[in-house]
Amino acid sequence: MNSDLNPTSSASLASSASPAFVVGLDAGGTRTRAVLADLDDGRPRGEGTAGPGNALTVPGPELADHLAEALAHAVPEPLRGRVVAVAGGFAGAGHQGQGADEPGRVRARTALSAALARLGVTAATVGVHSDIETTFATAPGHPADGLVLVAGTGAVAARIAARTPAATSGGDGWLLGDDGSGFWMGRAAVRAALRAADGRGAPTALVLAVGRELGLPPGVLPPEGYGVTDTVRWSAALRTAYRAHLLPAVMDRPPVRLADHAPLVVRAAEDKDAVAAEILAEAARRLAGTVTALGPRPGEPLVVTGGLLAPHGPLLTPLTERLAHLALTVTPVSDGSPGAVALARLAHGADR
Amino acid sequence: MNSDLNPTSSASLASSASPAFVVGLDAGGTRTRAVLADLDDGRPRGEGTAGPGNALTVPGPELADHLAEALAHAVPEPLRGRVVAVAGGFAGAGHQGQGADEPGRVRARTALSAALARLGVTAATVGVHSDIETTFATAPGHPADGLVLVAGTGAVAARIAARTPAATSGGDGWLLGDDGSGFWMGRAAVRAALRAADGRGAPTALVLAVGRELGLPPGVLPPEGYGVTDTVRWSAALRTAYRAHLLPAVMDRPPVRLADHAPLVVRAAEDKDAVAAEILAEAARRLAGTVTALGPRPGEPLVVTGGLLAPHGPLLTPLTERLAHLALTVTPVSDGSPGAVALARLAHGADR
């Protein structure tokens, strides 16, 4: 029967009889995700998730465990010998101007090798990337050059040239910047509540929302409807008590927990709260400024991700509107693992 | 000879033979100051200083030691039996709406009693106040009602009614506010440097000043004159290296240390740096907003203090200009101890 087949069909048959696979990994601050895909067309064939994968903050042995767990779910045992390329995008694995000996990258490489060896995956090609690189690689057609903007708890933008970050903007951390991030929005919500309480700012529904989320005693909260209708008054005594409870409630938690309040801003803005709407608009303005600092060129691809900018993210529309004059091709993605799959396929010689 | 004297002279003689004294204490975050003064006219007769006196952050026994040390220097041993009234203004001793059982006030009272007993000072009247109250009591003529604004590392304003804080504005701490404070200015300086480095902001001499103050390696600093003249360029590689060194240098220290950089802003603004001048102007704007929230009335006294607003403080003039339309009587003071002396005299029945 085989003699009937022309060489092309023969190759196809051989390939379907013993197809090759790649694995893409997305190792972020909250979870690690592994995706198994066909080498040929990048079609996903399996996936698995495990705990945090930030290469700077997760200790090496734990990082290896999380990677191995995600890989074990994604790649069925019989297929582990047929994985030809693995690529991982790691949070904390360096962005720009930091060579292969950057500490996060070194740890990621060591942990990934250990995890692959443990599972018997002997891929010829293993690539370790920053999450910025894999995120950008999710852009349609997998271009080599363009822009990325990540806005979750933090906010950072990068220019990618030849698939590598060539410049970054923002990403200064919660203390100094991350303007327009979830942390920035959450802090703005608490600031707005405090400013309403002492008279520096306008009344806003954020007062009640923030106070409830921080578990303040109901007795110190303003009456229902405060900041929503003009007729609800908030007494001086309550304002004082509110502030006296709010400040320690915030200071008792790690500062970065302020990001928890970002969704309150989105909800209040949907309910037409003017203060919340202005916070959202200002966040979009600042994120646009973070991108603009990288000198965008008309038509360039811009991949956006993170809780605020993923598909249906609350800042996606205001940001896109704000950048409209730059005519960028904006692609929101929820996850860098398709980009990691793309980089694995490219590393093994696939042209797309 | 005594028979020659009229009753008034006799009283005067008696008083000069065995005059009575008061003590005013200013117990702040960096030092404790005690001033001995005449009961009659408030004239200072002695003073002493010792370590920190913040009633919330300094443990009780240590606080008592610092108070005793300052008192021992201020009040010579032979006069200790002739002190009739003591008043102390304590940082951390509560501001508004917090009764006499407020934790800082309790600790201040206990520590002050212990210190006075140790030295054999048996004053009939001992008053414990917040530093806001004693600061306001430095106003000329010792009025009972008016406004105070403190801008040092933090920033807070208060309305004083009947010598007691009746409302506060700002003072939310470094994480949430203290807008216009030394912390706010210092953070703004570092932010301006980072924004110049990644292209979001304009060139500024703060880049070099902040980099040097944080001990960055000279090799990553921009060329001399950057931000001062338009002709000095700063390469992309240096910008990247600068950011990579600056961020950990800041994050390795307690956040509040950002206040250390506030004087750099003042110096750069004096040298006509536009970015620094805008930070100063914005700080003055925010401090003015903190006062305005308290609903100032024309002619009211406003006592201002703290490193930014004490006599010759860098924000005194811009703030005064910004508040000019309110026709307040602005008094800058460097220290609350004269106010503490005034409160001690008033408590003992002096009418001024």
Image (cartoon, coloured by chain):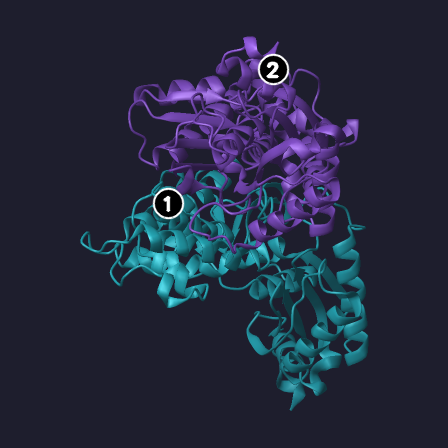
Chain colours: A cyan, B purple
Q: Quadrant of residue B299?
A: top left
Rendered view: A273 above or below B352: below
Circle 1 sits in a helix, a strand or a loop, which is it? helix
Residue B127 is left or right of residue A14, and the answer is left
Quarter the C terminus of chain A occupies? bottom right
Q: Is residue B25 left or right of residue B214?
A: left
Total count of labels: 2
Helix, strand or loop for disc 2: loop
Mark nearest the camera among 2 and 1 is: 1
Q: What amino acid does circle 1 point to?
A: Asp
* Vertical side of A119 occupied by A195: above or below: above
Q: Nearer the viewer, residue B249 or A330?
A: B249
* Residue A198, numbered circle: 1
Front-most of residues A114 and B242? B242
Q: Residues within 10 Å of mark 2 (few under 14, many from 20)?
A: some
In the image, what residue occupies the spot 62% across and 85% down? A4
- Badge 2: chain ID: B
Q: Which residue is mark 2?
A: B228
| Disc 1 residue crowd, few under 14, some 14–19, many 20+, Cα 10 Å | many
Q: Establish if A294 lies above or below A279.
A: above
Residue B351: percent from left, percent from top: 43, 27
Residue A245 is at least partly visible in this image: yes
Q: Position of residue A337 (x, y in %)?
A: 58, 66
Q: Pick the residue in front: B18 or A4.
A: B18
Chain letter belonging to callout 1: A
The span from disc 2 to disc 1 (Cα, nearest Å) is 40 Å
- What kind of residue is marked 2? Val
- In the rendered structure, the answer to whether residue B168 lies left or right of residue B209 reads left
- The quadrant holding residue B117 is top right
For image coordinates 65% across by 82% down, the residue present is A73
Q: Give the quadrant of the N terminus of chain A.
A: bottom right
From the top left corner, tell me how far across and down residue B8 is, in percent: 49, 15
